[in-house]
Image (cartoon, rainbow, N blue to C red):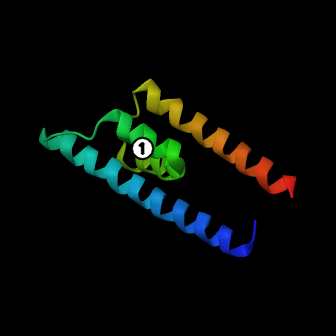
Amino acid sequence: MEIYGHNVITWYLVILNVVAILLYGWDKVCAIRSWWRVPELTLLLLALAGGSIGAMIAIQVFHHKTLHWKFKYGVPLILILQVAGLMYLFWQN
């Protein structure tokens, strides 16, 4: 991968993780106020798409979804798989 490709990937991940933090935080506000909630599938897909670090930060900061097994174990597993995949890709070159 050339340097430009790394910049695109870096910005993609930064933006996606910021969006993840904001969306998890918004869902926490909605939960407190009994408003319409963000679907769990959306939150998990956001983590799967590359926002797993932001999702984990938001789970800890907002104390949100900490008892749901999909988030307690699923998001860290997604993160581990993403890090392993990135390590594999970067050490291939």
Q: Which residue is drawn at 44% across and 40% down?
A: 45
Q: Mark 1 points at which residue?
A: 59
**Residue most toward the bottom?**
4
Seen in the picture, residue 24 relative to 8 is either above or below; the reply is above
Q: Which residue is nearer to you in this view: 2 or 57?
A: 2
Q: Is mark 1 on a helix, strand or loop?
A: helix
Q: Is 53 displayed left or right of 88 in the figure? A: left
Q: Residue 46, position in %: x, y?
A: 44, 46
The amino acid on which the numbered mark 1 sits, given as a three-letter code, is Ile
Q: Which residue is nearer to you in this view: 77 or 63?
A: 77
Q: Residue 82, position in %: x, y?
A: 64, 44
Q: Residue 19, position in %: x, y?
A: 39, 58
Seen in the picture, residue 35 relative to 19 is either above or below; the reply is above
Quadrant in which residue 77 is drawn? top right
Q: Residue 65, position in %: x, y?
A: 37, 35
Give the total number of marks visible in the rendering: 1
Q: Residue at x 75, y 71 (%)?
A: 2
Q: Which residue is drawn at 38% across and 41% down?
A: 43
**Residue most toward the top?**
69
Q: Residue at x 47, y 57 (%)?
A: 17
Query: Around disc 1, counting alpha carbons within 10 Å, would you say few (fewer than 14), some (14 to 19), or many (20 or more)?
Result: many
